[in-house]
Image (cartoon, grey):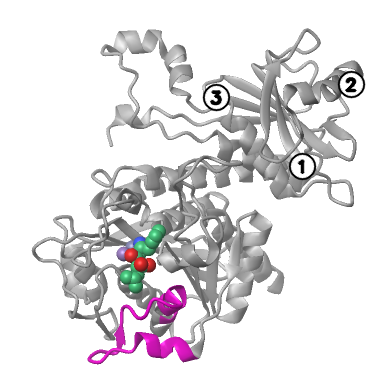
Amino acid sequence: MSEARDTIGLVTSVILSSKNPTAVKAEALVVATAQTSDGVAVVSDQLPTDLLTQLESLAPQLGVTGARDEVRKIPAGPKLAVDVLVLTGLGERAEDGTFATETLRRAAGAATRELAGLRSAAIALPASDDDEITAVTEGALLGAYVFNRYRTTGRSTEKEAAKDAAKDARNRKDPVAAIEILTPLHKNAKAKVVAERAQVVAAAVHAARDLVNTAPNELYPATFADAAKAAAKDVRHVKVTVLDDKQLASGGYGGLTAVGQGSARGPRLVKVAYTPAKPNGKVALVGKGITFDSGGISIKPAAGMEAMKSDMAGAAAVLSTVVAAAKLNLPLAITGYLCLAENMPGGNAQRPADVVTIYGGKTVEVLNTDAEGRVVMADGLVSAVEDGHDVVLDIATLTGAQVVALGTRTSAVMGTDTVRDEVKAAADASGELFWPMPLPEELKSNIKSKVADVANSGPRWGGMLNAGLFLQTFVGDHPWAHLDIAGPAFNDGGAHGYTPGGGTGVGVRTLLGFLEGRAAAEKAEK
Ligand code: BES
Ligand code: MN
Ligand code: ZN
């Protein structure tokens, strides 16, 4: 990852301001539209009435319906100080006349996605309380994300590149450079705090997306470990320790060792520990970090294999979440365990029928080398439980069965009932789609091994639950939840709302929401 490349695809700055949308100066002004019983309404009471009337009556000709995910750009005309007006749809109002915060988040993101290449934009969406400011700020930043690291300008000299920087940014559609969010609360202290938080959250999601989008020839266990160190550098109270392949082998981490041994690039276990001065709770986050999943000897079909660069999305979410929690000064000790390996069919690769010993001593019969995630996660989970946390959460692109069951946009959560429900509530509040799944006792026979304590794969049916039950073997009855993000972690299709194509950064907001909830609850108890 060269430095020159890292300077491309820059971040978007945000400020809150109370300027009137009519007077605000920017290249674009974003305004919401809504569906009403008799057509389209522009959701703004500050734009000139004649402009509102004109927009609403011309809506059919403009193709504006106010539907969700609909974005239209039109010339702003002489009444406004901006060049372009961007209309973003919110759909229908709820019974109480408001819009769900997730609707605002998506509409803001759908709009900023269309602003790539611009220098400045003002956003006049509903932002009159903390939740709305959070949603609009998060959505705007999440939608502004662009991954341009591998796109060159085609200019060969630095001088030329410097001269044409603005032009290149437009052509390459870099993220909109500066956003001004219009809100009556721009001077309110709490509003500033929530806007700051939203920026930390968005930066964390962006960092997770960047890792997922990075090509797997560049991002492998050793460079992922470097990325973890770089991300934690200068972040107070965060320490990164790395176990390399030799230390893993001699330390008894048989899962990571077995999965990693088919690759020329050895596995790593990275611990990212955030330890604030007076923590009032201790949480472990374990992430699956398969930097490329070829399937190993049980090799995957060629079609679609490229998406398996995203098989480290769980570890990326964990790293980003711990760093964000530290930046937000949460009063919780949090340790991230990044289980990093590359699953390749090299000459030393593990075979179906191999028996490996997980950290702590339990044995696993490897029936399918493509069920590698659970094998590396087993090492991480035992290690996390051993370290004595109040609760252990794990997050992984674990099973194709997750995608079959819930599709590409809804993740699954299973585990100890109360922790599972706590994760689901955090997901709901953050705007991420998660759905609870059971871990039926009677399916345990699916992962019985004829020779070892447990087998790493079983029958196809209930594949997501089999994987969950496998992980459960290694946490015992410790408070725990398992998040399977196989489908939602990587968007193979077109962008929607604030979600771009490629890495989505899913899980970061839910994990962070969970931690914030814990931090607040633990505090209240004291
Ligand atoms: N990384 C995959 C799961 C996956 C599939 C993630 C599709 C994202 C999209 C995992 O390692 C895997 O290959 N699982 C197998 C397990 C099976 C062999 C028991 C699967 O789900 O097919
Ligand atoms: Mn696999
Ligand atoms: Zn995998």
Q: Which residue is mark 1?
A: 91
Disc 3 and disc 1 in contact, CB within 8 angstroms? no
Of the image marks 3 and 1, the number of the one nearer the N terminus:
1
Residue 446: say if magenta.
yes
First-in-chain label (2 vs 1): 2
In magenta segment, residue 144: no
CB contact under 8 Å: marks 2 and 1: no
Give 203 or 76, whichever is nearer the viewer: 76
Marks 3, 2: nearer the viewer:
2
Mark 3: which secondary structure?
A: loop
Residue 321 pos. (x, y %): 49, 55
Image quadrant of ligand 3 equals bottom left
* Residue plotted at (30% across, 43% down): 215
The segment highlighted magenta reads 442-469
Q: Quadrant of residue 68?
A: top right
Q: Amino acid at mark 2?
A: Thr
At 25% across and 78% down in the image, what residue appears?
367
Between discs 3 and 2, the one toward the N terminus: 2
| Mark 2 burial class by Cα count in 10 Å: few <14, some 14-19, many 20+ | few
The amino acid at mark 1 is Gly
What's the residue at 32%, 78% (across, down)?
457
| Mark 1 vs ligand 1: CB below 8 Å | no
Residue visible at 80% across and 17% down? 22
Under circle 1, the secondary element is strand
Looking at the rendered structure, the secondary structure element under dot 2 is helix
Left or right: residue 247 compared with residue 111: left
